[in-house]
Amino acid sequence: MRTIAQLLSSFIVFRLLTIFIIKINSVIVRVISNLKFKALVKSSGNSICHYTTEIKFGHNITIGDYCKIGKLSSLGAKSPIKIGNYVTLSRGVIVETAALDLNSDLPYKHYSKPITIEDGVWLASNVIVLAGVTIGKNALIGAGAVITKDVKPGEIVVGARNRIL
């Protein structure tokens, strides 16, 4: 009976120690992630970004307060990207200002146009926002949508054909 009690107590201590180590690791990862984000995007307000987010040309990105950028997202800012306040970019969102001019001779020339995402916008998982787009205030873009044209304030865009609800 005594060995069972000792075994259980050592198991509980080991379990608590393991949970403590995992929590500490999580905190350290979040701190490093935030430091990386603040170093790459100088004007990032009071926002957070997952460490797996790819940031290209961070000096061209302006992010408002209380924005969240999810895992495995990509911000490519050859031209300026302006993100308002309270914006959420979910997992795997791609915001890319650069594109290829398919009307030019080979090899295709690159061009870029600015992207603006206004206050209160939510981009669901795996949304792609392409060059020259403005997404209006409080718009919601459904998972997997490819945004090639401006979205008006308050619109809900879903599906591959960008159906407006």
Image: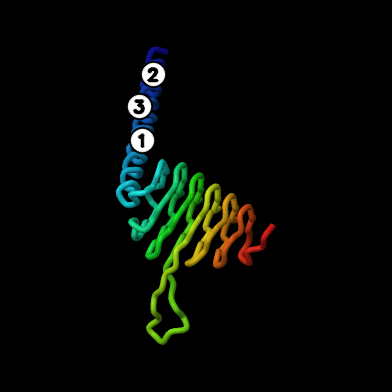
**Secondary element at tag 1:** helix
Separation of marks 3 and 1 at Cα, in angstroms:
15 Å
Q: Which residue is mark 1?
A: 27
Which tag, 3 or 1, sits closer to the chain's start? 3
Q: Which residue is mark 2?
A: 9
Total labels drawn: 3
- Which residue, as the protein is rendered here, is positioned at the far right? 165
Q: Are marks 2 and 1 in contact (CB under 8 Å)?
A: no
Which tag, 2 or 3, sits closer to the chain's start? 2
Residue at 37% across / 56% down in the picture?
55
Q: How is the image coloured?
A: rainbow
Relative to the observer, which residue lies in front, 14 or 130? 130
Residue 106 pos. (x, y %): 39, 85
Q: Nearer the viewer, mark 3 or mark 1?
A: 1
Q: Which residue is mark 3?
A: 17
In screen coordinates, is 89 left or right of 29? right
Tell me the quarter of the picture where residue 9 sits. top left
Residue 37 pos. (x, y %): 35, 48
Which tag, 2 or 1, sits closer to the chain's start? 2
